[in-house]
Image: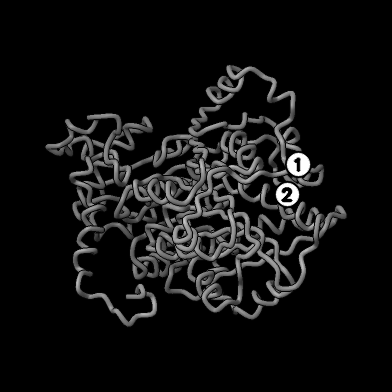
Amino acid sequence: MGVAELAKGIQYEDPITTGWKVPKYITAYPPQYQENIRKQYRILVEGEEIPPPITTFREMKFPKVILSSLKQKGISKPTPIQMQGLPAVLSGRDMIGIAFTGSGKTLVFVLPIIMFCLEQEKKMPFIENEGPYGLIVCPSRELAKQTFEIIMHFSRALDSAGYSSLRSCLCIGGISVREQLDVVRRGVHIMVATPGRLMDMLDKKMVNLDICRYLCLDEADRMIDMGFEEDVRTIFSFFKGQRQTLLFSATMPKKIQNFARSALVKPITVNVGRAGAASLDVIQEVEYVKQEAKIVHLLDTLQKTAPPVLIFAEKKQDVDAIHEYLLLKGVEAVAIHGGKDQEERSRAVDAFRKGEKDVLVATDVASKGLDFENIQHVINYDMPEDIENYVHRIGRTGRSGKVGIATTFVNKACDESVLLDMKHLLIEAKQKVPPFLSALQSENEKYLDLGEERGCSYCGGLGHRITDCPKLEAVQSKQASNIGRRDYLANNSADW
């Protein structure tokens, strides 16, 4: 709920109604039939009055041109999250989508928003300075750009088939505001944005959300981890009426569950694969490599598969060092991290996408939601600080049913609690656990399966309980160190 709505005591009880209805013959099927479909595709749902799953795009009533442009992309049949997610979103329900990366969740929010905008444009064309009708918020610029390109793909197809033309705009840092404002001034239907730039434009009243009725937070766990929770809550207060809110996330920490409870109206939770579980299409290998031997060992590891390969490192200087080393050894490599400017980042990602370069070295900027085709191999140069990031990273390979390999270098410098989480993740995904990992035993390991939840209820790690959670500890100590340091004159502090 937005602050203004809470202040006025506004409570939304019912979901938004839309013009889309489930086909009659599908609602006529007995409930048992719907349950069988969900069982078959391992779809878990929670919520009230859940729409039935629909197994073809045609029965979801998408126009022919959308079906043919899906075929162009090689998509003919919906994935499990789309079967349950699309009917839920099209019928106007708020939704929490939990799916492992590479499960096709982008289409679950892109296709409905395009259909709703077409409907609005047909009833009453958008005039100058009007819009956006739909807002999609992504944690990183690269992910926002990727989502924007998918929307443009469908918009162009609809345009050439004689439908009303839809205007979309990309609001991310690193691009001049003027270009973005030109589109907004003409009236915009869909806006894809990163939280920082969006807040900036809302504060300066360059954009308003007066008629916005559709909000999607992609990779929400990532956004809240990066410290955008305040921004996201503030965005809610710019809305002028009820909206349909969608929240997508590969993992589901307690923080997000609380956030979702306060922000969504009678949500439907669609879960495909355990929240925070690794994709089973990834073969995970863990190797013990001393810190100083890592960079040399990297070359041998690259020989395992054909390109394209992704290499992840924690620090920016490591990324630069690996990049330089690979170039010296004659490997066609590019690098991206937060320290590079936007143009350089876009150039690197495009060259890697087109297959001109074989290796992309990156920090976690590239681990969330970016979809590169046919990545054969992901190498973790160092183990991430928490297991969630590990799941995101290895999810870049083994997408859309293909098999991939993930190799991780670990050594004594790694945090033991993360290694324990990893050991349990490997056991859960039925992977080979190397001897040095299976030798790791924590005194609390016998308590892991107590109660209903396995592992930690705060961060989702399987190797520890909430009492030993390093992530929770870090958050608490950060809050404690901030006491008394508050800048009461800062522009973002509350109005005391």
SS class of the residue under badge 2? helix
Q: Residue furthest front?
A: 8
Query: Which amino acid type is shown beneath numbered disc 2?
Result: Met
Q: Is residue 361 visible?
A: no
Dot 1 alpha-carbon crowd within 10 angstroms: few under 14, some 14 to 19, many 20 or more: few
Taking depth in this image into account, of 471 and 380 the one nearest to the observer is 471
Q: Which residue is mark 1?
A: 62
Q: Answer above or below: position of 492 versus 322.
A: below
Q: Which residue is mark 2?
A: 115
In the picture, measured across the screen, residue 218 lies left or right of residue 262, that is right
The residue positioned 43% from the left and 58% from the top of the image is: 223
The residue positioned 60% from the left and 36% from the top of the image is: 79
Q: Estimate the x, y position of residue 203 in percent, counting from the top left.
A: 52, 75
Q: Quadrant of the C terminus?
A: bottom left
Residue 486: image quadrant is bottom left
Q: Estimate the x, y position of residue 440 in percent, counting from the top left.
A: 18, 39
The residue positioned 48% from the left and 36% from the top of the image is: 271
SS class of the residue under badge 1? loop
Q: CA distance from mark 2 to mark 1?
A: 8 Å
In the picture, measured across the screen, residue 464 lies left or right of residue 193, that is left
The colour scheme of the drawn protein is one colour
Q: Residue furthest bottom?
A: 489
Q: Is residue 462 visible?
A: yes
The residue positioned 44% from the left and 61% from the top of the image is: 7
Query: Which amino acid type is shown beneath numbered disc 1?
Result: Phe
Q: Answer above or below: position of 263 versus 357.
A: above
Taking depth in this image into account, of 452 and 369 the one nearest to the observer is 452
Q: Do the CB atoms of the residues marked 2 and 1 lie less than 8 Å apart?
A: yes
Residue 292: image quadrant is bottom left
Dot 2 alpha-carbon crowd within 10 angstroms: few under 14, some 14 to 19, many 20 or more: some
Q: Estimate the x, y position of residue 453 in percent, counting from the top left.
A: 30, 33
